[in-house]
Image (spheres, helix red, strand yellow):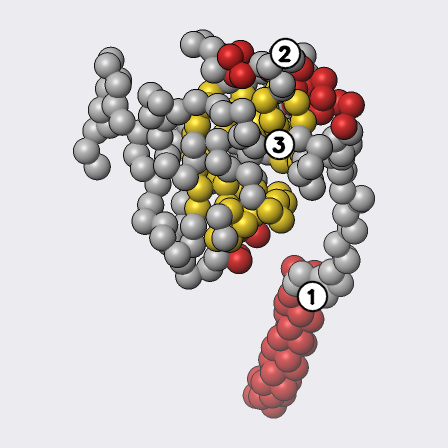
Amino acid sequence: MKDATNFAVACRNLLLPLVLSVCCASFGCATSERVVKEAPPSYQPSPVAPGPQVKMPEVAAPKLAEVQDAVRRVFKDAAIVDPNSKPSFMAGDFNGDASEDLAVVLRPAPGKLSQMNEDYPAWLLREPISGSRPPQLRVEEQDVLLGVIHGFGDNNWRDPQATQTYLLKNAVGSAMEVCTAEDFVTTNSGRKLPKPKGDLIEEVLRGTSGYLYYANATYSWYDPKTFKGDAELRPFHGMKPKPAQ
């Protein structure tokens, strides 16, 4: 009887480690399997290539007949496109309202000087270099002027309602071309710059290379050598002053 008991104890001592080994192995397999199932897949799908970008339709370049129509719309028969200027017109978004504007070099039409100097014209006469409109500012017979007709609606400066116009005196130079605001900042990096609303007109005016630009509700002249900053708008009657910051 004693021998049988000892034999049973010995068998138990031998079987217990074996059972524990099997259980551990099974638990390890289950754990490994669970880890494999929970781990994120190593395969990463390649990103879907974007489709072709939708481009906004390009606005057609101005044609002389269209430009002449726009000039007649604003100035009637008091001004004509200057045939001696090259170029005599160009398009760009000069006031930054996402509508294309027209800049055109003009001369007073023969015998129409009085109409160009009427008391309440359909345009704003300005002199960008002086930055003001003195009471004596008038159009002279020999003047070469720059008219800027701001665009309106989907048809831009071609629209029959596009009549907001600035007439700039002493603003026509040579080598005139449209310059984007981005190119303007890049070209003049490191200098004190104005904050134009849109495209600029680069030109050589009175022997100086500079830019015509729109800011503070008027057109101004930027000379890289003499620019000190845009003049602030003067408050008018009824205008609330800006709060101190």
Q: Amino acid at mark 2?
A: Lys
First in residue order: circle 3 vs circle 1? 1
**Cα–Cα span, label 1 and label 2:** 83 Å
Q: Secondary structure at mark 1?
A: helix
On residue 36, which mark appears?
A: 1
Image quadrant occupied by the C terminus: top left
Query: Could you tell me residue 109's position as x and y percent?
Result: 62, 19
Q: Amino acid at mark 1?
A: Val
Task: Tell me what residue is drawn at x 39 percent, y 31 percent.
Answer: 216
Farthest residue to the left: give it. Answer: 244
Task: Tell me what residue is drawn at x 53 percent, y 57 percent.
Answer: 186
Circle 2 Cα neighbour tier, 10 Å, few/some/many (<14 / 14–19 / ≥20): few
Total labels drawn: 3
Q: Is residue 44 left or right of residue 163?
A: right
Q: Which residue is mark 3?
A: 105
Q: Which residue is mark 2?
A: 76
Image quadrant occupied by the N terminus: bottom right
Query: Could you tell me residue 49's position as x and y percent?
Result: 79, 51
Q: Nearer the viewer, residue 31 or 234?
A: 234
